[in-house]
Image (cartoon, grey):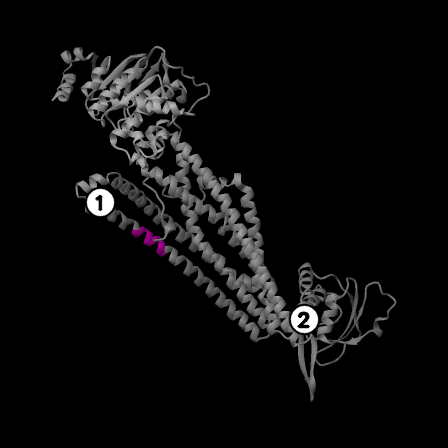
Amino acid sequence: MQTELISADDKNRAKNASIRTPHFRRMLRLVWPHRRLVLIGLIASIVYGFLNSAGIVSVLPVLKVMLSDEGLHGWVDRSIAEDRLGMDLDIRTRADGDNDPIRQLMITDVSTHSDFADSGVQALDSIDAYALQPSGDDDVESDTQLQTVEPSKFLEAIASADDGAKLTIVTSGPGGDSSAEAVMVTLDQASRNWRIAGWATSFVPRARHQGGRVTALFWVLGFVVVVNLLSNVARFIAQYFVAAGVLRAVMDLRRTLYRKILRLPMSFFTRDTSDLVSRFVQDAQEMQRGLMSIFGKMLREPIKAVFLLGWALALDARMTLTMLLISPVAILLFWSVGRKIRKANNRLLKTYGSMIGALGTALDAIGVVKTYNAENQERKHLWTIDRKMFKQQLKIAKLEAFLRPALEMMGIVGIAIVFAWLGAKVLQEDIKLEEFGTLVIVLGMLIDPLRKMADVYPRVMRSAAGAQRIFEVIDTPEEAELLEGALELQPIKESIEFKNVTFTYPETETPALSEINLTINKGETIALVGANGSGKTTLTKLLVRFYDPEHGAVFIDGIDIRSAKLASLRRQMSMVTQDPVVFAMTIAENIAYGTRQPNEDAIKDAARRAHAEEFINAKPEGFGEPVGERGSTLSGGQRQRLCIARAMLRDAPILIFDEATSQIDSESESQIQDAVREYATGRTTILIAHRLSTIRFAQRIIVLDQGRLIDQGTHDELIERCDIYATICKTQES
């Protein structure tokens, strides 16, 4: 299974994720704070593209040394001379009876912009004699300096002549007739590219014999090695700095996302939490891969292709433009296959989200699974989901497997066409064999960036979808957005009041609370009793502002808690939940959780009052003992007592106990109740309990049923007049 095909999604994923969306642009802007690192990478990518293409094109000098009679220097000299004279030249060998063959310098074409164009010099003429008068030497008679042309020496002289030198040539036609008069021109400077080529070849010893050509070959090959070494160094720098910038950007994104998730309202968490995990991990990873591809291959490969294209155009513009005719077909193929990959990936990611949820549920309830011998049932369930994933993965793999060969095949067809065209020109002696080989190699290498882009495009499409999902979370309004001017709530002085409170959980229709009117005085201990689902815990959630009521309001000292800053409200609360929450920290860190600069003595005192000190001291590392994920090394009762110690250490004026002693044995329960009675003195305490011993501890008992407040009073009062309360007490006594 290819890991790059795996991501996470659910039914909320956008069906038409695109790189044209604002989310994709926001993803790109993540890199802006780290633009210096990415800029270094991009500059190195440009250097790599140039050097890489130069290393590929440097095959031409190698072929010139190995295959051409004129050699490397001769080719450069001829090219510079052609540039300065405005004509194409070729060295031809003509047999002269029994004598040695004669080497002639033939003009194969004359540019219309050349100084020779209007002088009678024309194609198929040969240059027989010449005179070169240095610039500024006006006293020398040009006709006294004519000398017979030896092609290689003539070309070398023209290539190395100063600007402004005067050249006189004598030509003869195809029949051997000499021109009526000599033609004189002033030499202009060669173009910059050929001046650079001349300067570069000046470092290579000029070959005057066969051994010299071997030496020149070694020099050229050494140059190729150095260029490729520098090219790979630039590539390393490009990849490293781009990776550094992108990884920092994704780290910033995760930090922002983590902060956002922790500040989202509780209603956001009523959906499957595996979706949040997948967004935080998988979708962020998809964005990381996409950004790596965008600032890596998606920029590096086109840069390399541009340089290669430039070299190819310089070698033969017509052939290169013919090769580019396949580009529209390649773009159409990219678009078509990319769209199919995106759709298949959407279905894959939805299934992957189901896999995360199913696996998480099975692992969390592994004890129940084993007890009920349901291993096969869970295996079949996961296997069914896995089969759906497999089908989508296989479809994506098939599309990606098709895209690269299809693009390569198109490139091969284009190369074959150009190969046939160039081959015909070689046989017709219109171009030289080494130039033919170089052009074919350069055009062939143009396929490589296209092939690599075939891998990049699907990855970028997946990152666009991941960006959309992540920014949906980031754009979600935070929990009770803190408006400017929100009140700083002071510690409770008088009472808590629920006034006409009605609340319904999201995605449900039946109200959890209906028209609740309740006043809790400062320092009073009340107990909320009722059957499961009667609204006991919901009432405390409204007090802590996990949710806000649909109708009515909750007041502390006459202040609507919705107008208070959340931090100031929750500083007044200590809470022990029904399910003891223990983090993967040490025991001391769990007790001090949420307390700034905790005091070691205060931690130990809280543990003592919660009757947790005995089992803590029995641990090998005492308060420094790690408790494992979700407190896996502790029993249920031990976890409960740690949570009670945490609430005691917080020392808040309002104390909420939700089934606080449900997992503690009777002896420990009695001791804890004594500690709670002492701790509750002067504090407003809300107890949610079914045990009669805990209920009797309260000064006032509130009876709830199906979200409504049925009755309230003392134990004796309610046992006489409230049937629901009497039933609860009978159940406890039986």
| 635 vs 219, nearest the viewer | 635
* SS at mark 2 in the image: helix
**Vertical order, 189 against 585 (above or below):** below
Q: Residue furthest right?
A: 139
| Residue 579 in sight from this viewpoint | no
Disc 1 target residue: 378
Left or right of residue 111, residue 54 in this image: left
How far from the left and from the top, in percent, is residue 504? 27, 24
| Residue 393 in sight from this viewpoint | yes
Left or right of residue 250, residue 719 in this image: left
How far from the left and from the top, in percent, is residue 85? 72, 66
* SS at mark 1 in the image: helix
Tell me which residue sits at (27%, 16%) in the image.
677
- Give the quarter of the image for residue 648: top left
**Vertical order, 234 against 591 (above or below):** below
Tell me which residue sits at (43%, 63%) in the image.
409
**Which of the marked residues, 1 or 2, is nearer the chain's N terminus?**
2
- Which amino acid type corresponds to the residue marked 2 in the rendered image? Gly
How far from the left and from the top, in percent, is residue 724? 15, 18
Disc 2 target residue: 74
Q: Residue furthest left?
A: 734
The total number of labels drawn is 2
Residue 397 drawn in magenta: yes
Gap between marks 1 and 2 measured at Cα: 78 Å
- Give the quarter of the image for residue 357: top left
Magenta residues, start to end: 390-398
| 425 vs 205, nearest the viewer | 205
Tell me which residue sits at (53%, 65%) in the image.
441
**Vertical order, 19 against 647 (above or below):** below
